[in-house]
Amino acid sequence: MTQVIRTAAELQEKVAGWKRSGILVGVVPTMGALHDGHLSLARAARAQSDRVIVTIFVNPKQFNNPEDLTKYPRTEAQDLALLEAEGVDVLFAPQPEEVYPEGFATTVSVAGVSEMLEGAKRPGHFDGVATVVSKLFGMTQAGRAFFGEKDWQQVQVVQRLVRDLNIPIKIIPCPTIREADGLAMSSRNVRLTAQDRSRAPALPNAMQHAAQSIRSGVPIAQALEEATAMIVAAGFGEVEYLELRDAETLREVSDLSRPVRLLAAAWLGDVRLIDNIDV
Ligand code: AMP
């Protein structure tokens, strides 16, 4: 049975009991509307920890766009059934007032890696992420936290955060889970119209094409330009960015001498899709 916990006090009491017995706790932070991507994290947590806590909290602080926050899908009953099937021990699903009570005054801000790409396009987003993740790490006392590479920059921000603040937790990045046609699974995909859904694989396809071109020696700028044109030709709106970056610092790169990552954000109708791949 998955126990549903709504308050920090109850969660901390539960975890304190586990910790006294030397149990290793794994946490999977999510915003719900769970799909196979999330469940792959729960499975990794199950395999690599003694107890698994999945958190579902649509964190208002990480939404820079109020409309995106209101339209964010919320499917808790269905989510709980999926977590039961995965053998998750605790679903922690607090209300916003529980996470940010009257008087809450702290913001955790990671400089550098938070500032570009998603950070530049979504001001305040990573402060919201770093703040809520810090709280969840404190409340769950987890020894391991599982994050999806789907949000590559988020993983780098969280790694920087735990290193900088000596938070005793190991961050485990897990691969992006995709639909059969290559579209990265995302809770926002349900908001795509049928026509846009059929156009959506153009994003990962164009990215794969760019990665292959870059590997085979096509100049980076040219490969990115061609891929952007492919995405637009497929019916996407604005391509906010399509960039080859240092895989860890997310700084710009001019060659392949260090590990790099290809990252993109683009609009399809009123849905903003992000993706990233190895090169
Ligand atoms: P979210 O609910 O979108 O905040 O995502 C919660 C966690 O699930 C984050 O660590 C995401 O990176 C991860 N995640 C979301 N989509 C996927 C996916 N398609 N594959 C793997 N992990 C994912």
Image (cartoon, rainbow, N blue to C red):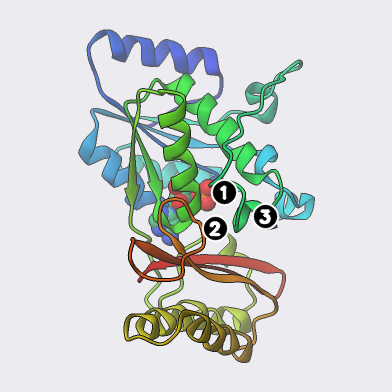
Label 2 CB, ligand 1: below 8 Å?
yes
Q: Secondary structure at mark 1?
A: loop
CB atoms of marks 2 and 1 within 8 Å: no
Where residue 265 appears, x then y in whole percent?
Answer: 59, 67
Where residue 54 appears, x then y in whole percent?
Answer: 42, 36
Residue type for callout 1 = Thr
Label 1 CB, ligand 1: below 8 Å?
no
Residue type for callout 2 = Ser
Q: Secondary structure at mark 2?
A: helix
| Relative horizontal placement of residue 104, taking residue 36 as reference (left or right) | right
Q: Which residue is mark 3?
A: 120
Residue 75 marker = 1
Q: Which residue is mark 2?
A: 187
Point out the tag, 3 or 1, that comes first from the N-terminus.
1
Visible in this render: residue 89?
Answer: yes
* Residue nearest the observer in this picture, 241 or 257: 257
Residue type for callout 3 = Ala
The span from disc 3 to disc 1 (Cα, nearest Å) is 30 Å
| Quarter of the view holding residue 105 | top right
Visible in this render: residue 58?
Answer: no
Relative to 229, residue 278 above or below: above
